Structure formats: structure tokens, C-alpha cells
């Protein structure tokens, strides 16, 4: 696989065997890399293929989010899928990662939001 675009040090976009864009994650996978560089297979931890309209949003999202938050979201999604026994919609990677990131950042800033439904 070759890098199409470096999103950050831990996330790059590439093309799968069918020519569809995929998001590839792994610690340091994009560090000091550029478009056209080969992706080191040993660094690949996760490969996400999303609908085209979602791929662009996911790239925007992960460019500003710490890698640990993305790992946490993926772990939760894997756990939920396993325990629910259902395949989850791929867009959950975008929505849950975004939600977790903002929740963690609010906690770090001591911002407490009240749940209006409680």
C-alpha cells in the first residue's frame, strides 16, 4: 500500500485493492512520510473503509484528535459489536470518536454539562 495523504503521525489515507480510499491507522505510520511512500505493514494496526462522503469527514476528524482517543473509540466499538452480536454501522467510528474526544476534552477543562433528561 502507498500513502495517498498523510493525515497526522498516526493516520494516513491510502487505496485498497479495488482503488477505494481507506484510512490506515498505526503508531507513527505517517511520521516523516509523504504521498507516494510505501506504508510499513508492521505499523498497520487498523484499516477503515468508509463510504466516500464519510471518509472525508473521518480524515478531518482524526487530523485533530489524539491517537489514544481513536484507539479508545475503536475498542468500544469492537466490544459493542461482539457483545451485541451485530455488525455496527461504519459511521459509528466518526460519531463515537468525535463524541469521546469532546467528552474527554470537556473533562480536562472541568466543564460539566448537565443532562436535561435527568
Image (cartoon, helix red, strand yellow):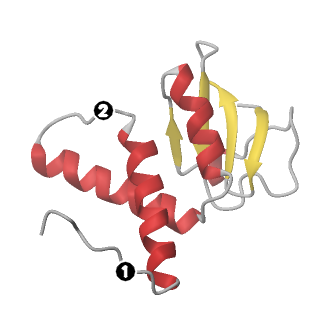
Residue density around tag 2, few if under 14, some if 14–19, many if 20 or more, within 10 Å: few
Quadrant position of the N terminus in the picture? top right
Q: In what element is the residue under mark 2? A: loop
Classify residue 99 as left or right of residue 77: right
Classify residue 50 as left or right of residue 82: right
Mark 2 or mark 1, which is nearer the start of the sequence?
2
Quadrant position of residue 112? bottom left
Residue density around tag 1, few if under 14, some if 14–19, many if 20 or more, within 10 Å: few
Q: Report the front residue among 51 and 37.
A: 51
Q: In what element is the residue under mark 1? A: loop
Q: Residue 112 bears which disc, if any?
A: 1
x 21%, y 45%: residue: 81
Q: Residue 89 bears which disc, if any?
A: 2
Q: Give coordinates of residue 6: x percent, y percent.
A: 78, 44
Q: Give coordinates of residue 29: x percent, y percent.
A: 71, 53
Distance from the alpha carbon under mark 1 to that under mark 2: 29 Å
Quadrant position of residue 37? top right
Q: Report the front residue among 36 and 50.
A: 50
Q: Report the front residue among 102 and 16.
A: 102
Amino acid at each position: 500500500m502507498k500513502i495517498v495523504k498523510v493525515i497526522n503521525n498516526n493516520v494516513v489515507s491510502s487505496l485498497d485493492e479495488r482503488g477505494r480510499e481507506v484510512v490506515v491507522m498505526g503508531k507513527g505510520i505517517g511520521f516523516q512520510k509523504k504521498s507516494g511512500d510505501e506504508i510499513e505493514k508492521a505499523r498497520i494496526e487498523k484499516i477503515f473503509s468508509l463510504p466516500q462522503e464519510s471518509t472525508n469527514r473521518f480524515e478531518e476528524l482524526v487530523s485533530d484528535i489524539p491517537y489514544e482517543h481513536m484507539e479508545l473509540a475503536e475498542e468500544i466499538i469492537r466490544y459493542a459489536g461482539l457483545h451485541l452480536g451485530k455488525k455496527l454501522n461504519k459511521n459509528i467510528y466518526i460519531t463515537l470518536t468525535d463524541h469521546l474526544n469532546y467528552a474527554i476534552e470537556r473533562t480536562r477543562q472541568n466543564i460539566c454539562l448537565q443532562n436535561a433528561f435527568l
